[in-house]
Amino acid sequence: MNDQLPDPALLRGLTQARLGRRDALRLFGAAGGAALVAGCGGIAAQGKKTDTSKSAVKQYWSKQKETGQLVWANWPLYLDTKGKSDHPSLDQFQQQTGIQVKYLEVVQDNGPFFAKVQPTLSQGQYCGFDLAVISSGIYFNKFRDLGFIVPLDQDRLTNFRKYGAQKFQNEPFDPGNVYSIPWQAGFTGIGYNPEKTGKQIKSWQDLNDPKLAGHIGLFANNEDLPNCALLAIGVDPLKSTESDWRKAADWLNKMKPLVRNFYSQNYINALATGDLWVSMAWSGDIFQQNLSGKAIGQKLEFVIPEEGGLLWTDNFLILKGTKNAVSAMKLMDYYYQPKVAAEVTEWVNYISPVPDAQQVVEQHAAAATGGDKKYLDAVAHSYATFPKSSVYDQTTIGFTPKAGSQLDKWNSIFEPVYQS
């Protein structure tokens, strides 16, 4: 397949304002924390566990035919864009393959999207979407455990195996990439304004400083917040026990008098204006905010704390009942070509799962001038887009409680921290 894309500098002005997936949620009104909590208890849907044996998967894919169509559900503003509706990399895919893609920005949070498709998928019927981008964690597990995901045809993942980062080739939540490959990824750590804090922030424990009282932000959700609290008290989330969860909640409760607010999505604005001095943060948000040049004083800093941070991925999933499975596989693998991956990264500013895309961005930077050059240089060498292996080594995917009694217990311990 020809993987040549037009020079992105010719497609749009690189210095125009851009928003990533999580930043976009503020514009679309999705309440991330609240949506994540809703429906996270016992699973009511009836699902049948998927047979992932080699023979069953081979039999399924032997029956799939190319249809020339595809419906792709993604998050808002999570793909390279020209104008209001054109997506250069997607346009190129359609031209090369003849596959017509209906691209819909309908995943405004994992929970509401799950609720939207669950009734149809539970009946084993086509939900209207062939391909969806879903985050690692509770809802990924729900889709998988209910049998709502089609096991991938590993023989069609040529580019993924060749160019995909080793970090993403065998993820703990999906060993062997049976069901998924990453779309983009990011870190959860600490963002802060050094002009306000007057010092470097290096540790989760630094958030307990009374001098920061009233200017500390934490996340209002049941995945990032609990896992970061476990890291703060020196516990590996993946090995944590109920006793550890209670200790982590105690640590958070002791900090609550110092906390300005528990945020769903809008913490970055508070950091930029100086209302917050330090906060739990997503790597791409801090990087994008600094590129916008709108933060007061010095630029914001992002750090993976000494105790560790979180690595999350947003993943391609083919949904049960799909009518266009072969088209979905072709598109997934298409985005693992370095030149295509680079075009996406230059827009969305989150971690590319394709390390070789960095060289392409560097080439674009070398050929650019002025603001475009400065912007592309930043993208090519950022922790938020192409982190070094040493940064990955400081992170964990965190613990995801199993739906049912374990998740109910987890929520009963942590929800009161940020809901009261």
Image (cartoon, rainbow, N blue to C red):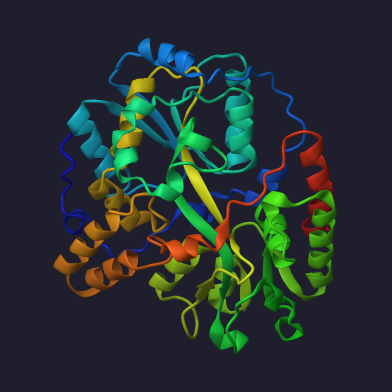
- Which residue is drawn at the image coordinates 18% and 41% (left, top)? 3
- Which residue is drawn at the image coordinates 23% and 32% (left, top)? 94
255 relative to 134 in the view: left or right? right
User: As rendered, which of 211 and 182 lies closer to the eye?
Assistant: 182
Q: Is residue 166 above or below residue 324?
A: below
Can see residue 222?
no
236 relative to 132 in the view: left or right? right
Q: Quadrant of the N terminus?
A: top left
User: As rendered, which of 108 and 202 lies closer to the eye?
Assistant: 202
Residue 260 position within the rendered picture, expressed as x and y whole percent measured from the top left? 72, 72
Q: Is residue 251 above or below residue 400?
A: below
Q: Quadrant of the C terminus?
A: bottom right
User: Quadrant of the rendered structure where residue 211 is?
Assistant: bottom right
- Which residue is drawn at the image coordinates 72% and 38% (left, top)? 40
- Which residue is drawn at the image coordinates 45% and 75% (left, top)? 294
Q: Is residue 142 above or below residue 250?
A: above
61 relative to 319 in the view: left or right? left
Residue 8 position within the rendered picture, expressed as x and y whole percent measured from the top left? 21, 55
Can see residue 155?
yes
User: As rendered, which of 82 and 53 lies closer to the eye?
Assistant: 53
Residue 305 position within the rendered picture, expressed as x and y whole percent measured from the top left? 60, 70
Q: Is residue 283 above or below residue 124?
A: below
User: Quadrant of the rendered structure where residue 268 is?
Assistant: bottom right
Residue 275 position within the rendered picture, expressed as x and y whole percent measured from the top left? 63, 77
User: Quadrant of the rendered structure where residue 193 is?
Assistant: bottom right
